[in-house]
Amino acid sequence: MPLKKSNPDFILIIVTLSLLAIGLIMVYSASAIWANYKFDDSFYFAKRQLLFAGVGVIGMLFIMNVDYWTWRTWAKLLLIICFALLVLVLIPGVGMERNGSRSWIGVGAFSIQPSEFIKLAMIAFLAKFLSENQKYITTLKKGLVPSLALVFLAFGMIMLQPDLGTGTVMLGTCIIMIFISGARIAHFAVLGLMGVAGFVALILSAPYRMDRITSFMDPWKDPLGTGFQIIQSLYAIGPGGLFGLGLGQSRQKFFYLPEPQTDFIFAILAEELGFIGGTLVLLLFALLLWRGIRIALGAPDLYGSFLAVGIISMIAIQVMINVGVVTGLMPVTGITLPFLSYGGSSLTLMLFAVGVLLNISRYSRI
């Protein structure tokens, strides 16, 4: 194990805090009208997001100083706890249902989303498994199948809620980790075909998922139903032009785009800050991705490398899906934009994950 610590990646800290600051501003701008109407307090969502951000930043700074191989020791226990929470959330009276998905557990005035936290627990455990069994990863029996079996178990439990978006992010992250570890292309090709077949079956098994696919292909076929969100999102992005309508000047947040502070916050950002503002945010995410890749390449051991790859893959996949949905390039699914969208579980998880990444950077050889 490495013995000498250096300073954490300063650029990664600045990028993360910059995205967080933009997110806090946009959560208030996007939610003020809705919050004033529903709660008689235009700062309702902004204040809660600020609280989540405070907890997340404190957690990030604390975790930044916890040696990353500590998570290797506790990975199994953390994963068991997260699996237990996934079971609890399915129990009526314990799990809270929102928009047809039973994904939350109430904790006082707040709620937590276990499916968010199992993403990071799975990354920590899979990094441990892959680093200890890399010599077997080219085999099906001892390498690929055991690692994927656990991942698909977690994916199946998340789908019972159901939450296809979160499950897809976790599944995609784990597949990238396994691929990076040296799994055979031929094995992935076969499993990929099986995965596509399974994904199609999941879509066909639920009419609302099929509706999202058809609305993605032609949102105007049902403009007041399944195509409503994407149409309103595009109505927000289009008028934004190069420089936007101005901060706070969005029109779509006036009850056109449902709850714009969550999954579709990027649409409001593009409407108010224009192409320039949207591009700046994407460049910040690209810079974060670059720093994460550097940290993974410079990690002193396999566990640190796999852990960093998992974290940065999780963030990258979530950004691509969210922006893809908002711009009409992908079917609508419930995925938050990291650091920007309103949501306590998602925000704190991302900041905790960056804390782990920062600790790995303290031992990086690059």
Image (cartoon, grey):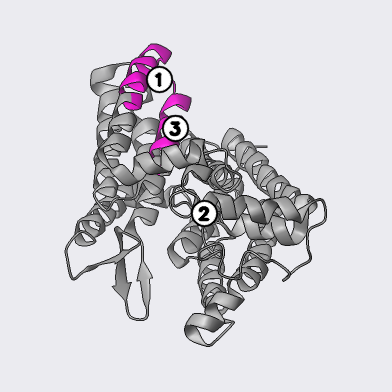
Please report whichever mark, 1 or 2, sits nearer to the chain's N-terminal start: 1
162 in relation to 1, above or below = below
- Give 270 or 158, whichever is nearer the viewer: 270
Do residues under tags 1 and 3 come within 8 Å of each other at their CB atoms? Answer: no
Mark drawn on residue 229: 2
Q: Position of residue 315 (x, y in %)?
A: 53, 46
119 in relation to 150, above or below = below
Secondary structure, mark 2, is helix
Residue 191 falls within the magenta-colored stretch: yes
- Measured in 3D between alpha carbons, the distance from the residue under mark 1 to the one under mark 2, in whole angstroms, is 39 Å
Q: Which residue is mark 1?
A: 183
Q: Which residue is mark 3?
A: 177
Q: Quadrant of the C terminus?
A: top right
The stretch in magenta equals 170-196
Residue found at x 39% / y 16%: 189
> The disc labelled 1 sits on which kind of residue?
Ala
In which image quadrant can residue 289 be found?
top right
Please report whichever mark, 1 or 3, sits nearer to the chain's N-terminal start: 3
> The disc labelled 2 sits on which kind of residue?
Gln
- Give 315 or 4, whichever is nearer the viewer: 315
Mark drawn on residue 224: none
- The reply, left or right, for residue 236 in relation to residue 347 is right
277 in relation to 172, above or below = below
- The reply, left or right, for residue 140 in relation to residue 217 is left
User: Is residue 106 in sight in this rendering?
Assistant: yes
Magenta stretch secondary structure, dominant? helix
Residue found at x 68% / y 42%: 286
- Measured in 3D between alpha carbons, the distance from the residue under mark 1 to the one under mark 3, in whole angstroms, is 10 Å
Q: Position of residue 204 (x, y in %)?
A: 29, 35
Q: Position of residue 233 (x, y in %)?
A: 60, 53
- Measured in 3D between alpha carbons, the distance from the residue under mark 2 to the one under mark 3, in whole angstroms, is 33 Å
